[in-house]
Image (cartoon, grey):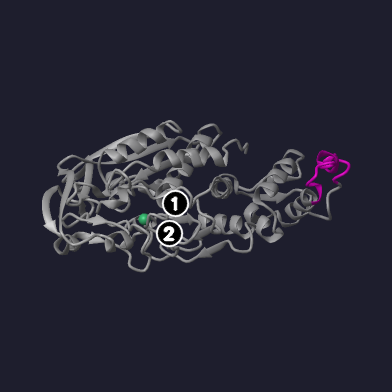
Amino acid sequence: MTETTTGQALYDTAARLFPICRSITGDGVRQSLAVLREVAPIEAVEIPSGAPILDWTAPKEWNIRDAWIKNAAGERVVDFRANNLHILQYSTPVRATLPLAELKKHIFTIPAEPDLIPYRTSYYSERWGFCMAQRALDALPDGDYEVCVDSTLADGALTYGELVLPGEIEDEILISAHICHPSLANDNCAGLSVAAHLAAALAQEKRRHTFRFLFAPGTVGAIAWLAQNEARAHRIKHGLVVSGVGDAGAPTYKRTRRGDAPVDRAMAHVLSLAGPNARVIDFSPYGYDERQYNSPGFLLDVGLFQRSEFGQFREYHTSADNLDFIAPEHMADSFAALRAGIDILERNRTMLNLQPKGEPQLGRRGLYAAIGGDKDSYSKNMAMLWTLNLSDGKHTLLDIATRAKLPFATIADIAAVLEKAELLRETA
Ligand code: ZN
């Protein structure tokens, strides 16, 4: 695979998404899809509010233009336009003046992290509220405050983005990222960017599988897609939820419910070569939309790729998850890991050694010469010997790569060379 996507390009897309106030519905989702469409031709799908989606209902659409709290002097002491985390997501409209003690009933802080603004939502009970730093709240003098939430909560649509890249076979690989958080860089913008750039890269290549990319609001978006595609969802044979892929934490892969699916083995192999801190963790029915895809009525083999583990880092769901918390090199590393995992799903196969009695004479066939002088020639020689030795029709190329502790791509490339030299053939 050629590699042209840079960490800076991945970061720049995330940075463009960052200021947009996304929620589970509304214009922020549409604006975000417009940004992503500059990377890959993602289509927007709109599900009308009130439509039944599995056991759920498509929610009302929420849009917000402005929100603030003003002091007696008319100064904005909390300003949505300065940071969109200040609004409780799905706040109903309000215009009122009330004393500080009453106002506090509508304010969310993190007392243990007094300088951070929390991210809070109230999708399913109608109310209004603000989020702010505890220290800023403590600094407010008693008195009356004017509040304004200029929002609408009305029938509209739930929007998600979808892109299909047809392959040679109908079996699909799903890449899914959530598109419902406001200004949170790692827990939203990074995953959206990496997924869109993966789509752009794969669009340029010959594909065996059909690839489906979803950019859907968390939970209801995945449920809406499953409801719309119930009859065809079984075509998804492998999948990855991509989330939290921009921070400095080591890569972490969360297995599918099945636990030993091809995508689990592919990502375990990639992470086995990704440094001492890379981790593979077990499935649990909490986290991102892998919960929906792995529900018992669908049982799609979809794992989760992330860096720092969901919910386990200080910056999670706070104003500290900003553009300083993610970096181009971490995004590039995540992108490369996902590409390597996808490459395994695309190219893994089982070969048979056609000269299994003793080692075949490689020099006579020009096979040492074919790789001589290559700076990786030692590992390529080892890859050739391992591939010949284990190609007994029982071991896949991934099995061989895992046993040899060599990158899958090295084994798969060597297998292609040996196949051309008529030393290997693919088993049926
Ligand atoms: Zn989140």
Residue under circle 2?
315
Q: Earlier in the sequence, mark 2 or mark 1?
A: 1
**Horizontal placement of 282 versus 341: left or right?**
left
Give the vertical position of 305 relative to 12 (above or below). Answer: below
Alpha-carbon distance for marks 2 and 1? 9 Å
Question: Which of the two discs, 2 and 1, sits closer to the camera?
Answer: 2
Q: Is residue 262 left or right of residue 311?
A: right
Residue 152 vs residue 237, the one in the foreground? 152
The residue positioned 55% from the left and 39% from the top of the image is: 8
Image quadrant, ligand 1: bottom left
Which stretch did the figure color magenta?
362-378
Q: Secondary structure at mark 2?
A: loop
At 32% from the left and 51% from the top, the residue drawn is 218
* Residue denoted by label 1: 186
Neighbour class for label 1 at 10 Å: few (<14), some, many (≥20)? Answer: many
Picture coordinates of residue 241, whole percent (x, y): 43, 52
**What amino acid type should be assigned to the residue bearing mark 1?**
Asn
Residue type beneath disc 2: Glu
Q: Could you tell me which quadrant the N terminus lies in?
A: top right
* Residue 373 in the image: above or below residue 268: above
Q: Magenta includes 84?
A: no
Q: In the figure, residue 121 lies in which quadrant?
A: bottom left
Q: Residue furthest right?
A: 364
Q: Is residue 341 above or below residue 316?
A: above
Crowding near the residue tagged with mark 2, few <14, some 14–19, many ≥20 C-alpha atoms within 10 Å: some
**396 w.r.t. 228: above or below:** below
The outermost residue toward the bottom is 112
Kindly indicate whether the residue at mark 1 contacts the one at mark 2 (C-beta within 8 angstroms): yes
- Quadrant of residue 142 within the rendered picture: bottom left
Whether residue 313 sits left or right of residue 350 in the image: it is: left
Q: Magenta stretch containing residue 374, yes or no?
A: yes
Q: Locate residue 345 relative to residue 297 in the image: left or right.
A: right
